[in-house]
């Protein structure tokens, strides 16, 4: 075994326990071989049968740190890092129409690659090892994912409103083609989905066609659902049914599907999501910034819906730090439920790890023998994390992305002692800043 050993730290286990354990990683397999003396076969490492090397080929020092599953950013538009801080303080609809869509119309594949590099760099530096991305030029995003060493579920976002029939159909076809072509790329670290932007920005006939073809090809579906009342009301007015009922009728409510936002859901929709096994990706910072509303996170969890966390694009957040998202989700979840015991620390940590991996259908999210070796080491030796009464509380309420010391995905070290090894951080920042400035100049012309 080519072994990587994470030594001297405390480890957050799937059941919420924190143990002082070394984590042994089989780099060839990309999996966790042992946590402490627990191995895949359930044997103790010091038994003669256990196949664990006594020395590691590489070690990562986790002394004073907490080893956690790599965080999962289950909904973003990663290249929107180029539009970080470009237009703020507006509601969703005018913000999209007046600022974001005109800028996106000028984006080139090179811009998208530059923005994706910047976003992935930011995510690795804040302990995120997997993300879901809905955008354009996805071959370029896939190339970045491949080089950077992270995992992703990628899809081309479809919008048909305002397009003629041929253009609209071409957009649907591109999303399906991208999903088929890129699935399994980057040694299997890339999976895909059919990604209609939402139930209001894609026409019914195109939704029906696209969903049917995705189902036939066993491709999951990701879309924005019930984000604002502006998006829910037209569906109710025109169809006499709620959006989630419409999604179900379209065949778009499956166990492998995951919907972003889920802010304005009624009880019947929560029941439908739970019955179907469709996951919801909660994006608290985006929902607050765009004043979209408060998602019923505790009610979703009580109903048994898998809830993940997403940053949404950097233009509505304005960063891609899932630690911020955990804190925001806990805080907003309490306000939404009018109950300080709602959405506790352990819940948001689960949403950012196992919940995210489950929502995206990607490996990872748990530190246990046999699981994918996707993890981060959070430095607890910091004033804002002292004392450590409860490490899980710190993850939810006090830690930041900049506290992450090492990041590992698929058994490979992506960041060691805060130095990202798979991307040239300075070059990525310079390229993205230049691309963003050029883009804004073109939009202004
Ligand atoms: Zn979004």
Image: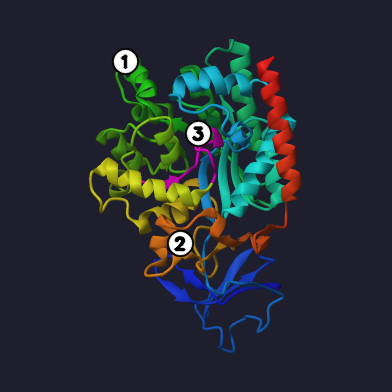
Q: Which residues are magenta?
A: 305-320
Query: Looking at the picture, how far across and down is residue 314, in whole percent?
Result: 55, 37
Cβ of disc 1 within 8 Å of ligand 1?
A: no
Taking the image as shown, residue 418 lies to the left or right of residue 98, namely right
* 338 horizontally vs 368: left or right: left
Q: Looking at the picture, does residue 137 appear above or below residue 400?
A: above
Name the residue tied to disc 2: 384
Q: Which is in the foreground here, disc 1 or disc 2?
A: 2
Which of the marked residues, 2 or 3, is nearer the chain's N terminus? 3
Cβ atoms under marks 2 and 3 closer than 8 Å? no
Residue shown at the point (68%, 33%) measured from the top left:
112
Is the magenta region chiefly helix, strand or loop? loop
Q: Residue at x 40, y 70 (%)?
A: 17
**Dot 3 beta carbon under 8 Å from ligand 1:** yes
Q: How many marks?
A: 3
Residue picked out by circle 1: 237
Mark 1 or mark 2: whose residue is earlier in sequence: 1
Kindly give the residue lying farthest to the left in the view shown: 338
Instruction: Work out whether residue 186 can be spotted.
Output: no
Cβ atoms under marks 1 and 2 closer than 8 Å: no
Q: Which is nearer the eye, 190 or 401?
A: 401
User: Disc 1 to disc 2, how far (Cα)?
Assistant: 50 Å
Mark 2 residue element? helix
Res. 373 in view: yes
């Amino acid at each position: 075994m080519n072994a990587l050993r994470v030594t001297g730290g405390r480890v957050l286990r799937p059941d919420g326990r924190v143990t002082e354990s070394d984590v042994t990683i089989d780099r060839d397999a990309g999996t966790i071989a042992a946590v402490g003396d627990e191995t895949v076969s359930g044997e103790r490492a010091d038994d003669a049968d256990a196949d664990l090397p006594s020395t590691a080929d590489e070690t990562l020092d986790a002394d004073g740190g907490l080893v956690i599953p790599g965080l999962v950013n289950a909904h973003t538009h990663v290249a929107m890092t180029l539009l970080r801080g470009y237009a703020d303080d507006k509601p969703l609809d005018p913000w999209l129409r007046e600022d974001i869509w005109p800028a996106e119309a000028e984006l080139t594949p090179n811009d998208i690659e530059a923005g994706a590099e910047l976003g992935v760099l930011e995510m690795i530096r804040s302990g995120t090892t997997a993300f879901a991305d809905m955008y354009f030029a996805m071959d370029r995003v896939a190339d970045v994912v491949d080089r950077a060493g992270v995992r992703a579920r990628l899809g081309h976002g479809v919008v048909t409103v305002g397009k003629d029939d041929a253009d609209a159909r071409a957009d649907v076809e591109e999303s399906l083609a991208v999903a088929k072509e890129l699935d399994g790329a980057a040694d299997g670290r890339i999976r895909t989905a059919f990604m209609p932007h939402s139930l209001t920005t894609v026409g019914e006939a195109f939704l029906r066609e696209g969903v049917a073809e995705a189902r036939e090809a066993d491709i999951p579906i990701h879309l924005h659902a019930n984000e604002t009342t502006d998006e829910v009301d037209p569906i109710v007015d025109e169809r006499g049914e709620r959006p989630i009922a419409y999604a179900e009728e379209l065949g778009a409510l499956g166990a492998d599907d995951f919907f972003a936002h889920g802010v304005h859901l009624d009880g019947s929709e929560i029941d439908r999501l739970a019955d179907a096994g469709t996951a919801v990706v909660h994006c608290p910072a985006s929902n607050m910034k765009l004043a979209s509303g408060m998602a019923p996170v505790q009610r979703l969890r009580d109903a048994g819906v898998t809830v993940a966390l997403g940053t949404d694009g950097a233009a509505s957040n304005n960063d891609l730090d899932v630690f911020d998202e955990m804190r925001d989700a806990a805080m907003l979840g309490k306000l939404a439920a009018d109950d300080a015991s709602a959405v506790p620390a352990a819940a948001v940590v689960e949403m950012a790890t196992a919940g995210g991996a489950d929502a995206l259908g990607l490996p990872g999210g748990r530190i246990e023998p046999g699981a994918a070796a996707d993890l981060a080491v959070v430095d607890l030796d910091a004033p804002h994390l002292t004392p450590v009464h409860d490490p899980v509380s710190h993850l939810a309420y006090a830690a930041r992305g900049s506290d992450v010391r090492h990041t590992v995905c698929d058994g490979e070290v992506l960041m060691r002692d805060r130095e990202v090894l798979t991307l040239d951080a300075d070059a990525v920042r310079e390229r993205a800043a230049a691309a963003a400035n050029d883009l804004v100049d073109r939009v202004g012309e």
